[in-house]
Amino acid sequence: MTATARASTAIDTVLLDIEGTTIPVSFVHEILFPYARAAMPALLAQRADDPAVRAALADIAELAPGVPPLAQLNAWMDGDAKIGPLKALQGLAWAEGYRTGALQAPLFADVLPALRRWRAAGLRLAVYSSGSEAAQRLIYGHTTEGDVAGLFDGFYDLRIGGKRAADSYRAILAETGWTPARTLFLSDIVAELDAAVQAGLHTCQLVRAEDGTIAGATHPVAATLDDVSRLFALPEA
Ligand SMILES: CSCCC(=O)C(=O)COP(=O)(O)O
Ligand SMILES: [Mg+2]
């Protein structure tokens, strides 16, 4: 496949990754992840009766039998594992940070104007992130530009499958009825875009200067969502 945009059919749905696409990698890795790591011991100790915590602990016991949950979580966090129980517990930890105002998510400057423009033009917007659906709603509900979660019609997480597997995108299409040839997936990670292409979606790699993203050779490349608008004939500023 070439790295040029294929926009002969109008895009009506944009599915967006978060980290490195709409929000800087540095916020996730330098603020969110350390916050969750620091909060994890107290979360496990103090909320052991919370059904969400219990469900995550049961998943950990199944995935890593005999390993103390906190040790397993720390190992996963060390490796930035994209795995359900870790993502569920991180989301619970972040909820407190957003509630107190300790956490506020910075969007890249081009993101909110473009999303509002696309939405106003009738495009459907949805999120697909390794972060839990709850964490996705929280991050967009607590940005430095206010609560923007209402811009999105859907929030997909690891429960539908991993982002590097074509079947995950097929499952999203099957669940929603979206037309693959009218759906555009945006991400900074080539392996995720490769999987989306296998499922028939259009793709574009966000190569954010602030994140030092390396451009691949097999997908259209955009530095901002304004570039995406130009490449895919979406409403421009
Ligand atoms: C919901 S914000 C935190 C995102 C996260 O936990 C993560 O691992 C990054 O996932 P993404 O799929 O957005 O790259
Ligand atoms: Mg990303």
Image (spheres, helix red, strand yellow):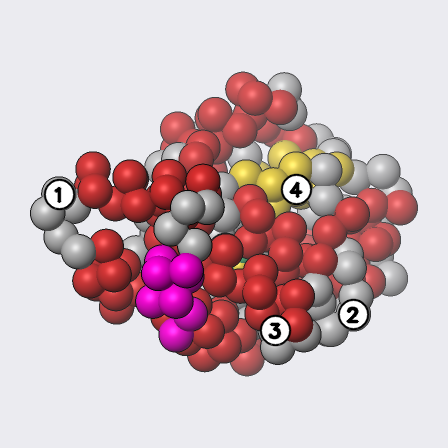
* Label 4 Cα neighbours within 10 Å, binned few <14 / some 14-19 / many ≥20: some
3D distance between C-alphas at marks 3 and 2: 13 Å
Residue type at mark 1? Pro
In the figure, residue 99 lies in which quadrant?
A: bottom right
In-front residue for pair 42/24 = 42
Q: Is residue 39 visible?
A: yes
| Residue 155 position within the rendered picture, expressed as x and y whole percent measured from the top left | 61, 41
Mark toward the viewer: 4 or 2: 2
In-front residue for pair 227/119 = 119
Q: What mark, if any, has residue 145 been given in the picture?
A: 2
In the rendered view, tell whether residue 208 sits above or below residue 56.
below
User: Which residue is labeled 1 in the image?
Assistant: 65
Quadrant where the N terminus is found in the figure: top left
* Label 3 Cα neighbours within 10 Å, binned few <14 / some 14-19 / many ≥20: many
Residue range highlighted in magenta: 38-46
Q: What mark, if any, has residue 126 been given in the picture?
A: 4
Mark toward the viewer: 2 or 1: 1
In the rendered view, tell whether residue 90 sits above or below residue 97.
above
3D distance between C-alphas at marks 2 and 1: 43 Å
User: Which residue is labeled 3 in the image?
Assistant: 103
Q: Is residue 164 visible?
A: no
Residue type at mark 4? Ala
